[in-house]
Image (cartoon, rainbow, N blue to C red):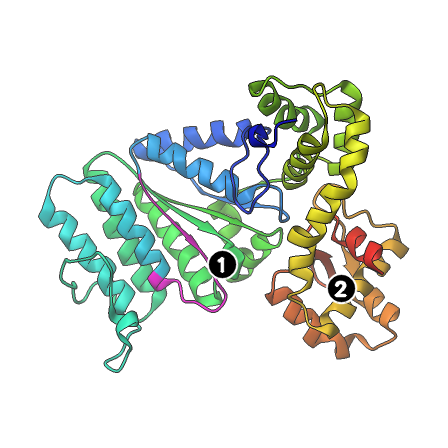
Amino acid sequence: MDPIRNPYAPGAGQRPPELAGRDEQLSAFDVVLERVARGRPERSLVLTGLRGVGKTVLLNALRSAAVRKGWGTGKLEARPDQSLRRPLSSALHQAVRELGHPEPAETDHVLGVIRSFAQRDAGADAKLRDRWSPGIDAPVVRGRADSGDVEIDLVELLTDVGGLAADVGKGIGVFIDEMQDLGPDDISALCAACHELSQNGLPVIVVGAGLPHLPAVLSASKSYSERLFSYQRIDRLSRDAADRALVAPAAEEEAAFTADALDAMYDATRGYPYFIQAYGRSVWDIAPRTPITADDVAVAGPEAERELAVGFFGSRFERATPAERDYLRAMADAADGEGVDDSEGAGGSVATSDVAVVLGKKPQSLSPARDSLLKKGLIYSGERGRIAFTVPHFGRYLRSQA
C-alpha cells in the first residue's frame, strides 16, 4: 500500500489521526471550562498513566478545548533539575497574551508581576539568561510575587492572573506535563495556590499529567490534595476504541481491516495507543492491498517490534547505567516469577525484596540504583516496598533481550 498515504503516526506526544477512547475526558473538561468561566467551583485536573497511553496527547487536546472557549492557556514540561518559576512564567505570559484584555495598563501590571516572579531567584550576579524575560516589556512590579517564598509568590501570581481573566469573563488554564518531576517545594506551592484559587472562585485551573504515582506525590506534599484535584487514570484503550483508532484513519484513505486483522492487532498492542500507531504504520507499509489481513499483521509484526525495541524501549534502556540495567532485568525476572503481566491495565508491581533475591544482594545495597531509576522515570513506586515499570511491556522486552 502507498506509504505516502500511511495515516498512522507513532511519536512522543504526537496526536494520532483518530483520538479514540477519550470522549469521556473531553466532554467532562468542557463542563469544567463552562463552570469555571461562570464562577462556579471546580477542581483542577490530574491525568495519570504509564508512558505510551497518550497523556500528553490528551493534555494538548484539553488545552485546545480551552483555546476554543477563548481561554488564555500556557503549557510547560516539568524537569527535576529546574525550578518552576521560569517555565511557569513563560506559560502564563502566553496565557495573558491569549486573553486579549482591553486595558493595556491592567495587562502590563500583571505582566510585570509575572516578570517579578520569574526573576526572583536571579541575584545581582546572575547570568543574563536568568535575568532575561523574553517578550515581557512591562516593568517589574516590586513587592508582588517576589518574596522568595515560592508558595506565597505563586498564590499572589495566580491571583493577579486570575483577576485579569475574570475581568473579561474568561479563564486561565495552566497545563503541566511530567508533573511528578516538580520539586517538593514547587509541588507544595502549586497545591497551596490551587487551594487558594478554588476558595476565592478565580477562573484559573491547573491540568497536570504524570506517571501513576503522581497522586501519591501530591498527597505527600499537601494532605488536602486528595480533595483538591480530580484524578483521572488514562489507561489502554478498550477493544472498540482500539479498533476505531485503526479503522477510522484507514477509511479516510479508502482502506480497511478484516475482522481477523483487528483481532491480531489488539493481541499485539493490547490497546496501548503508541503501540497501535507503531503497528498500524508497519502493517500499512507491508500490506500489499486492502483489506489488511491477519497474515499482513503477522508479517509486519517483527518490523513493528524492531521499531519499538529501538525507539520506545531501547532509548530508555540506553539511559540506564550497567548497574541500573541489572536492576531492570532483575525486576523483569521477578515479575515473571510472580506471574505479573505488565501488559495488563496500569501494569504490575514487584516487591523490592524480590528484586534483591534475584540479584543475590541485600535490598539496602540496591538503593542507589533504584533511586536513580526512579529519578530517570524508568520505574515508579506506587506503594512502599514495591516498584513497577513506567513503560508497558518493558519487562517482556527485557526478557526477550536476555
Q: Is residue 392 visible?
A: no
In the rendered structure, does residue 139 fall within the stretch colored magenta? no
Q: Is residue 395 visible?
A: yes
CB under 8 Å between discs 1 and 2: no
Horizontal side of residue 316 vs 58, given as left or right: right
Q: Which residues are magenta?
A: 72-86
Residue with the mark numbered 1: 222
Q: The disc labelled 1 sits on which kind of residue?
A: Lys
The quarter of the image holding the N terminus is top right
Q: Return the x and y of residue 311 as percentages of the image width and height.
A: 64, 52
Residue type, mark 2 in image: Leu
In the rendered image of this protein, does residue 12 appear above or below residue 315?
above
User: Within the magenta stretch, is there residue 79?
Assistant: yes
Asked if 317 appears above or below 167 in the picture, the reply is below
Q: Report the Cα–Cα distance between label 1 and label 2.
A: 31 Å
Q: Position of residue 290 (x, y in %)?
A: 70, 19
Residue 34 horizontal side relative to residue 216, left or right:
left
Q: Is residue 106 left or right of residue 324?
A: left
**In front here: 382 or 268?**
268
Q: Name the spot of residue 79 as percent of width and height, x first.
A: 48, 62
**Crowding near the residue tagged with mark 1, few <14, some 14–19, many ≥20 C-alpha atoms within 10 Å:** some
Q: Residues within 10 Å of mark 2 (few under 14, many from 20)?
A: many
Q: Helix or strand or loop: what does disc 1 sit on?
A: loop
Measured from the top left, where is residue 301 in percent x and y? 77, 38
Q: Which mark is residue 266?
A: none
Spot the residue most to the right.
337
Q: Which callout, 1 or 2, points at the residue further toward the start of the chain?
A: 1
**Which residue is tagged 2?**
328
- Residue 359, by quadrant, is bottom right
Which of labels 1 and 2 is toward the front? 2
Residue shown at 77%/23% (left/top)? 293
